[in-house]
Image (spheres, helix red, strand yellow):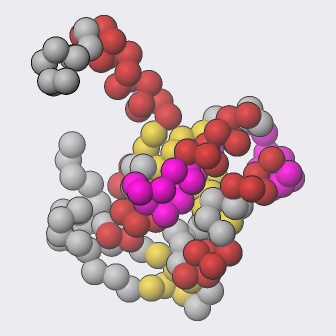
Amino acid sequence: MTITTSAPTTAEAVQHFAAKLQYETDPSDVKAAMDAGERFVLVDSRGEAAWQQGRLPGALHLPTAEIAGRASALIPRGTPVVVYCWGPGCNGSTRAALEFSLLGYPVKEMIGGFEYWAREGLGIVDDNGAIDRSVDELTAPIGPGAIDCAC
């Protein structure tokens, strides 16, 4: 298989990438939405040990296995939801997004998950408060107010 012989048509490519943007977001966009006061619920779909290790500020802990049974009691129907799990090597956020979709919630998956949120230096917390981490210059711009890559 080569890249050029299996390339989709322009229309197929437009449809694919437009759909991805409807269903996915990234850490810097979530942070910008939080800072702008957008109304959504940020859901950490990881297990208890991961939650205790650290999480995004303001996140609701709702492990994937509990979404079907607990979501409607915690999140009003129609409220936009953004889910995250560990990182790009984990499909837990995809599973969580599917669970919310099955319940009828508007949902987006935060690609990169907890890992890239932390690596971008966007701030994480645990039960004792803020956890300081430096920005990984391989994943995020460095400098005052540099929360997005300008892409």
User: Is residue 103 highlighted in magenta?
Assistant: no
Q: Which residues are the magenta region? A: 69-93
Q: Nearer the viewer, residue 114 or 1?
A: 1
Residue 57 point in image, percent of width and height: 54, 70
Residue 4 point in image, percent of width and height: 13, 18
Instruction: Classify the position of the C terminus by image quarter.
Output: top left
Would you say 61 lies left or right of 83 here?
A: right
Residue 15 point in image, percent of width and height: 38, 16
User: Is residue 81 highlighted in magenta?
Assistant: yes
In the image, residue 114 sits, relative to residue 132, either above or below, namely above
Would you say 22 lies left or right of 100 here?
A: left
Residue 66 point in image, percent of width and height: 78, 57
Task: Tell me what residue is drawn at x 62 percent, y 86 percent.
Answer: 127
Would you say 112 lies left or right of 105 here?
A: left
Task: Tell me what residue is drawn at x 40 percent, y 55 percent.
Answer: 88
Say which quarter of the image contains residue 28.
bottom left
Task: Tell me what residue is drawn at x 47 percent, y 30 percent.
Answer: 22
In the image, residue 49 sits, relative to residue 128, either above or below, namely above
Task: Tell me what residue is drawn at x 21 percent, y 52 percent.
Answer: 149
Instruction: Tell me, yes or no, if residue 36 can be seen here.
Output: no
Would you say 56 lies left or right of 149 here?
A: right
Say which quarter of the image contains residue 6.
top left
Instruction: Classify the position of the N terminus by image quarter.
Output: top left
